[in-house]
Amino acid sequence: MSNTPTEITLSARQLSRRFGSRTVIRNISLELRRGEVLGLLGHNGAGKSTTLQMLTGCLLPDDTETGKGYIEICGINLLHKPMQAKSHIGYLPETPPLYRELNVDDYLIFAARLRGMETNIADALGRAKQRCGLTTVGKKIIGTLSKGYQQRVGIAQAIIHNPDVIVLDEPTVGLDPAQIREVRTLIRELGNSHSVILSTHLLSEVESVCDRVEILHRGTLVFSGTTAELDRHGGEAGRLEENFIRMTEQHETEVQP
């Protein structure tokens, strides 16, 4: 086995975010390495989407003037060089940014051009469609596709420019069991050559596709480690779900006024 350190593709330090007087993210730090799938796990309303929006440059962290809120993508400071850093990111928000009146090919070509691609777009289109299982639906109107296929199109627009970091916000929500299995398989395959971070509130999702997990509760990270470490947390091996619930309930008690 090689002892060469795995490349860090995303590094975030001391991220916080307030909306008015309400603090929704508190001092979060995390790292993502190439070839890794990281799950951001938490109940609905834990702050997962807000965290991903900061990591992709859609929201600014607070307190950046004090040296906090530092985000680096492939060695590029996201706040100082946003266009350069964002060229290494592919992002699927919770609601896929689809133009339902376009066909799949036209939409993905449009997405490639938005990403600054000027050459080799046809090759990139073919690769993205092949990886996402869209080769037979290129000429179909997006609005006529099933939700599962629309989610695939959303992932395809996130990877068409071959980014180093792929960020997926609740990528399987609303899908049927067969579609969930297909999307999870795709995410695992993407993790072989890219870095992937996905948010979810499903322990089964973390178990099936993630190498590591960060548990977020009420805007605070309460656990960081592998799923095996979560499974053993507190000395109760084989009780992953119980350990997750216990950690979040314990944090809930600690933050009560």
Image: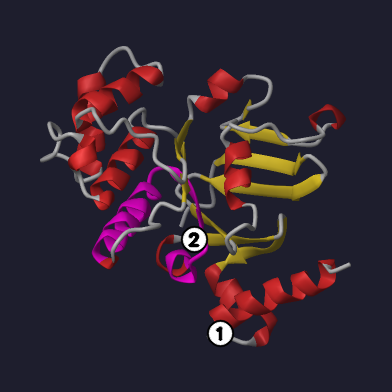
Q: How is the image coloured?
A: secondary structure
Q: Marks 2 and 1: in contact by CB < 8 Å?
A: no
The answer to whether residue 5 is visible is: no
Q: Quarter of the image holding residue 114?
A: top left
From the viewer's side, name the closer residue of 6 and 182. 182
At mark 1, the secondary structure is loop
Residue marked by disc 1:
239
At mark 2, the secondary structure is loop
The disc label shown at residue 211, or none: 2
Q: In the picture provided, is 123 more to the left or to the right than 47?
A: left
From the viewer's side, name the closer residue of 253 and 123. 253
Which one is earlier in the sequence, the residue at label 1 or at label 2?
Answer: 2
Characterize the local packing of mark 1: few (<14), some (14-19) or many (20 or more) Cα atoms within 10 angstroms: some
User: How far apart are the alpha carbons under marks 1 and 2?
Assistant: 18 Å
Q: Residue at x 25, y 18 (%)?
A: 120
Dot 2 amino acid type: Asp
Q: Is residue 152 above or below residue 85?
A: below
Q: Does 216 appear in magenta?
A: no
The answer to whether residue 179 is visible is: yes
Question: How far from the left and from the top, in percent, is residue 60?
Answer: 69, 31
Magenta part of the protein: which range? 178-206
From the viewer's side, name the closer residue of 46 and 91. 46
Q: Does 187 appear in magenta?
A: yes
Question: How far from the left and from the top, in percent, is residue 223?
Answer: 68, 65
Q: Is residue 72 above or below residue 80?
A: below
Question: How far from the left and from the top, in percent, is residue 218?
Answer: 71, 59
